[in-house]
Amino acid sequence: MISVYPTPGAVISLRSATWKVLSTSTLKRGFREVHCRGLSGLVRDKESRFVWDLEKGARVLDPGAVQLLPDASPGLIDTKLHLEASFRNTPTTTRRPLTLGRAAIDDLSFQHLPVERALAQDRVRLLIADDVGLGKTLEAGLIASELALRGRADRILVVTTRAMLTQFQKEFWTRFSIPLSRLDSAAIRRMRNRIPAHYNVFDQFDRSIVSIDTLKRDAQIRDAIKHSYWDLIIIDEAHNAAARKNTAGTIAQRAELAQLLSRRTDSLLLLTATPHDGSQESFASLIEMLDPTRVPDPTRLHRTDIEDLVVRRFRSDRKVAADIGQQVPERKLIRRNFPLSSEEEVAYQSIADLHLDLDEQSTRGRAIDLFRTTLAKAIFSSPAACFETLERRIRGIENGTARGTEEDRVRLRELADQVSAIETDAFRKYQDLLRMLREIRWTGKAARDRIVIFTERIATVSWLAERLREDMDLSEEQVARVDGGSVEADVRTQEVIEAFGQEKSPIRILIASDMASEGLNLHFQCHRLIHFDLPWSLLRFQQRNGRIDRYGQDRAPLITYFVGESSHPKVRQMWVLEKLVEKDEAAQSGVGDPAVFLGKGDAEEEEAVVAEAIASGIGAEAFDAEMNVRAAEAEAHMSLDDEFAALFGDYATPAAPETDAETNTKQAPPRLFPDTFTYASKMVERLSRPEERVFASLPAISREDRTIRMGIPDDMRARDGFGYASEGAVDGRYMPEEAVGSGDRIELTDQAQVINQAIDQAKMQERSWPTVQYLWDVHPILEWFADRASTFFPEHSAPVAPLSRLAAGEVAVVMHGAIPNANGAPVVDRWAVVIRGSDGTVRIEEVPDFITRMRLAEDTPGRAVEDLGLAQSAISVAVDRFQTHLVGLRREQGARIQQDLDGVLDRLAKLEGRFRTQLALDLGDVADGDAELSPAEKRRLTIRRSREQRIERMFQDWTEWFERTRHMVDDPNPYVDVKAVFVG
């Protein structure tokens, strides 16, 4: 009996198309709204809402009324491909990892933990805070792949730094076959010329990657976020969006944006190597993005409340070291001492003795905020940077746009004259750099002997680029720069980074500001890194080093830094930065978290500590002693305060395994073909028939090499001008345009080692994207195969074929059924074969067992079924039996699910109680409605009401989410699909 109104999971016919009902709701006047996803033709995968009562001709399709179509294809190939496509296109509900050891990456056991932890969660919310260079992007790729196989990553948004856009996009595609549309500034400009102004940009791209700076600057895109929703959002370098102590209670723009994003997605991954600045508040701000119900008081986090949300391991961890120890060559730090020239001594001494009225008038009282400190940082970088800083301030004082007295202007002009007197020959650090290059006989001719030079100041970047070209006899194109100084820096930066990793690129020296210090892979052709000026932050030093000292480096990283020597005591006392290098070595050797030495964990805060040491003139040894004291205090704190140690230590607790009950009811989808390549090759062969008219030229399939070479079919091309892809180019849903080879041909292989070789080979060519693509279960071409397979048998029909191994009179009906939740996502998911014997008995058999028993995966003789009556009569019986089976499963699972839900709701209730207790502690009791309240009490009452509303809304949202995802639709006749029928 079919219900009058459809329930979630039902398949309906409406407006000449077939739809699957995701959810239903009751409108005013009692009308029923249905939220559907298209299954056929032009509406496939499109979501729409309809008022059921107003749709003439709308009907729920009866699974028992399916039309049977005899399959006489050779070896029943049409039926087999149709079944395999159905198996693969059905999201699984198992929590067991399906991708570990199968992606196009090295299988490292420590990278399994984030995947297992994510799959153990009902709502994937995870902070991955592994050390620099341990593969957080790859861990995120594995999780995204797992979610994609479960139908929980149809819409993905990746937010990263503008320098990382192409690298992240390429990693996701080449390693995991997940296409992301890159929304850099040029792409957004092109797109805006093509789509109406009122269109939401994110409606045009299901899977996209964008820089956080683009989101932050562009008001139209920020507004689009508020009206969009994703299955998965990944925020890379998430520490840039965390609340920091130096914000003085204000929420930075990036943090505000990240909080908005966290509310517009089902699953959320935060990636960072520095998840806190040493304070619980900064750590708590990231946890609040993941799950705000866990943080009643940001100043008092408890590890037991958040442990399932965080994964953090250091390089010194035993399991990590065991996995990567032999594969990452040990780095070598090279210290080069140089004597200051007499001209430099004069300038340095003047800065050390400098007293400015504008510094005396400073209200903030921190050394880092003093202009003298700014000058010290500049001169440590280069005379060019210092002179530029001086000239800008002098002009500002003269035109009244900058603080400073006339006396300051005179002193600064004298200093500027001294700095300008430091000619290139007198700039001894630069001369020592040239000396070093000659000592190692570096000429720039060897393609794989490249150098990356880091400096903090853009003026130094410009000066070095010009001088190195002249002094090392290098061409314009051999010296490249990345500093973020141009209007479209994201596009130019990506081009330079791409070229630096290509062996055939002419670039030999890359001069970079610290915008390139986070996340980028600069190690492909480079193992030499030079700190032309040392950063005033240990974290920044570590981040810079991680660009070449990372997993995948095939040569020992050589890291060079410079230390100046002076004859003047006050100048010598300014050189304390080399002690940061020693502490980085200590962190690498086993301390783990380098934040203990400066006690901050935030680059800007660390710079403030170093500035105090330089301004006070305590000298290197005293500064070193201070850092040792901080580390000892942190160790003592950890030993005395287990909670502190637990909170800021590693997070590597294994995820809870599935229960036997879950394992038995949540199985991986069955398979007919032994692997994805075999299925794909059979499908391509089937679609290569002339009558299909799919390919302009015949695809080439090599089973020996396990490759498929084919042209891009017309229905894989972009059909309109929306988005930024050119009409006729490959549709970005299937692959990035850069992944298509010459002649619009693509090559697919399931061999991970071939992909890795292709990636390495691409680095040696002008083209940085390999044309060979990784063919595995996540590749979007499988969706295209499923679309094509659906044409073998029209909607609401199923193939029927004879099987000689079935007994005479037996009918086997292959079926799929699911019990969805209120959102339309499957909670109980089941494939089965319902077999009616010749004597009328009915039994259920597992699909894998049936495939094995019938030898269905082997060659199967094909012949048409002449009499459909026997098969047709068995369908209604099979449907009834399978629906009864599903109802039984719902009953069995319902008790366990309700017990789990009760536990979740109980935990939420306890957390809500802690929030309300904290509210009472913070604001006390205020008599509501008392007209005699003082202004202070009225303000307190307003704040209290606001926080009460926030608490109520927050817990209501999370409670509703769990209830909607856990509660199964109570339909006595759950919808089932008849996929194929076999007769004996």
Image (cartoon, rainbow, N blue to C red):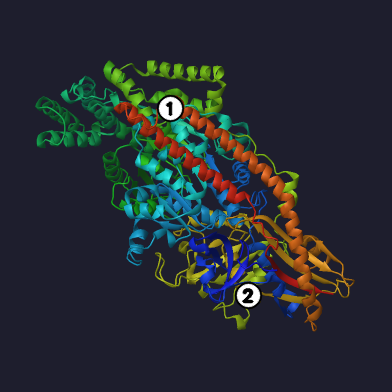
Instruction: Name the one closer to the observer, 586 or 949.
Output: 949
Residue 938's place in the image compared with 217, above or below, is above
Residue at 52% over, 24% down: 644
Please name the amino acid that badge 1 sits on: Val
Residue 416's place in the image compared with 48, above or below, is above
Left or right: where 749 falls relative to 157 = right
Residue 885's place in the image compared with 139, above or below, is below
Instruction: Name the one closer to the observer, 352 or 134.
Output: 134
Secondary structure of the residue carrying tag 1 is: helix
Q: Quadrant of the N terminus?
A: bottom right
Left or right: where 624 falls relative to 827 = left
According to the picture, the residue beneath numbered tag 1 turns out to be 581
Please name the amino acid that badge 2 sits on: Glu
Instruction: Name the one closer to the observer, 712 or 86.
Output: 86
Residue at 27% over, 34% down: 382
Residue 653 in the image: state x and y as whole percent. Answer: 63, 34
Secondary structure of the residue carrying tag 2 is: loop
Q: Residues within 10 Å of mark 2 (few under 14, many from 20)?
A: some
Residue 682's place in the image compared with 865, above or below, is above
Left or right: where 867 falls relative to 962 = right
According to the picture, the residue beneath numbered tag 2 turns out to be 795
Instruction: Name the one closer to the observer, 312 or 574.
Output: 312
